[in-house]
Image: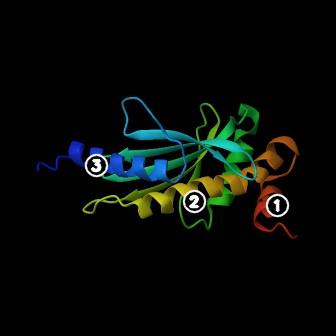
Amino acid sequence: MNNSPTDAGKEAFAILTQFLEEDGWHPSPIEDKLAHRMRFNGKNGQFGMIAHVRGELEQLICYGIAPFNVPEDKRMLIAEFITRANYGLRIGNFEMDFSDGEVRYKTSVDYEGVALQPTLVKNHIYPAAMTLDRYLPGVYAVLHAGKTPEEAIAIVENPSE
């Protein structure tokens, strides 16, 4: 069998699709990409998720996408918040697009040389979803309650204080 990057990407996408369907994610394919869109209902909000196989690179990238775009006048505050949040995170990182204010949490794995496994999918999609959900109250505190990024991180990371 010819294992071109395209074939390898299709195989990885089939594994991703099977995992998402069996795990109850209700994936919806994204046209012209080896990717799916889903919804996640967390305890702090509902938001979009994307799981994307980069077949030619043998990578899986999972995104949790915040259910809002940050207004332009708050982007520097949220940039500070996500920089503070990123410090110490073990799996993944927050990102913000300064052009439109989109905030997302990204996890990724390079599976070069091995087949993508359902366990790898699980170990990347859940941290993307759970971490974004965990930090949403901090983002809302900055955007709507006038908290500083430092105060908002304390709300999320030290809730008993």
Left or right relative to 101: residue 62: left
Q: Which amino acid does label 3 sit on?
A: Glu
Measure how far apart labels 3 and 1 are at the Cα level.
Answer: 42 Å
Residue denoted by label 1: 155
Of circles 2 and 3, which is in front? 3
Residue located 37% across and 46% down the image: 53
> How many discs appear?
3
- Dot label at residue 127: 2
- From the image, which quarter does the C terminus lie in? bottom right
Q: Where on the picture, by quarter, is residue 66?
A: top right
In primary-sequence order, the first of circles 2 and 3 is 3
Q: Which residue corresponds to mark 3?
A: 11
Q: Which amino acid does label 1 sit on?
A: Ile
Residue 52's spot in the image, x, y percent?
42, 44
Of pointers 2 and 1, the one earlier in the residue sequence: 2
Secondary structure state at the residue bearing disc 1: helix
Q: Nearer the viewer, mark 2 or mark 1?
A: 2
Mark 2 and mark 3 residues within 8 Å of each other at the beta carbon = no
Tag in front: 3 or 1? 3
